Amino acid sequence: MRELASAHGIPVLRHPNINSHEFLRRMRESGSDMFVSMSFNQIFGKEILKIPSAGTINCHAGKLPFYRGRNVLNWALINDEKEFGITVHYVDEGIDTGDILAQKCFPITDEDNYASLLSTAHQECAIILYETINLLRLGTATRTRQSDIHPVGFYCGIRKEGDEKLDWNQTSREVFNFIRSICHPGPKALCFLEGEAIRINSARLIPHAPAYRGIPGQIVGKTANGFIAKTVDSTVEITNFTFDGKIRVGDRLK
């Protein structure tokens, strides 16, 4: 981004605290009519929001008023959503709570994973943000209060190191969703076999897999692509993983 900005004569400023007195001073001197945020990891404070006369807008890869917060693409897959949204909204003193200017939704199929949703978001966020800025310039943009869509909505907490541990005491659908939600470029699902780590990058739901009681996490079969593991309700095939040891039927993943 720095190289692109330089090619077009646009100054680039980086600062660890956008709410500091120094940065506020520089923003006031910029004479900007509007601030635009995209994939930014700092919270806009009250004082910086007062500076641009046309306000501050943000592009958020979540279907507001739901999926506010962090890691929303991962959470959408974990929650087995059939679509995810990209929203452009005004920034207020809350977190992703400002009035909505534009929103588009995109389908999620069983062929999707974190990588495919991220690729869609990278492309579509730029498009919807550009379209919305043009509507604002023309004075034809409309705004919708989030409370008019839902009185509460919900917030997604940030995922941290350790959250990638796979719990086999879930249904096959839940295990499948969890694995695809944090596949590469995410950390990949983590479990252990005899104390050695297994990183799982992809899994496959087995059509017509019988439901039966068993030991969750136990390896009950091997395939050309990987192995079959027991879940709470049925079984799931692990198709892409890294492990330095040998996989045997009867082993138990923890």
Image (tube, rainbow, N blue to C red):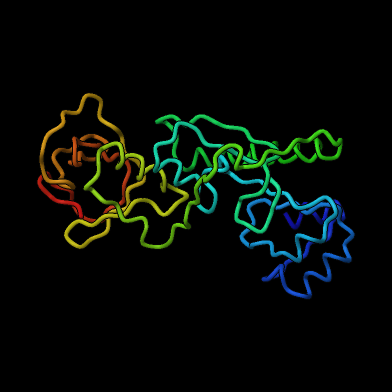
Seen in the picture, residue 165 relative to 154 is either above or below; the reply is below
- Residue 82, x across and y down, in percent: 45, 31
Seen in the picture, residue 238 relative to 155 is either above or below; the reply is above
* Residue sitting farthest toward the top: 208
- Residue 240, x across and y down, in percent: 32, 42
Q: Nearer the viewer, residue 171 or 96?
A: 96
Q: Is residue 158 left or right of residue 1?
A: left
Image quadrant in which you'd find residue 127: top right
Count of marks placed on residues = 0
Seen in the picture, residue 147 relative to 96 is either above or below; the reply is above
Q: Quadrant of the N terminus?
A: bottom right
Q: Is residue 70 left or right of residue 207?
A: right
Q: Is residue 232 left or right of residue 11?
A: left
Q: Residue at x 61, y 60 (%)?
A: 41
Q: Quadrant of the C terminus?
A: bottom left
Q: Nearer the viewer, residue 47 or 120?
A: 47
Q: Nearer the viewer, residue 106 or 219?
A: 106
Q: Residue at x 54, y 43 (%)?
A: 151
- Residue 45, x across and y down, in percent: 69, 65
Q: Residue at x 49, y 44 (%)?
A: 73
* Residue sitting farthest toward the bottom: 21
- Residue 174, x across and y down, in percent: 31, 41
Image quadrant in which you'd find residue 109: top left
Q: Residue at x 27, y 59 (%)?
A: 197
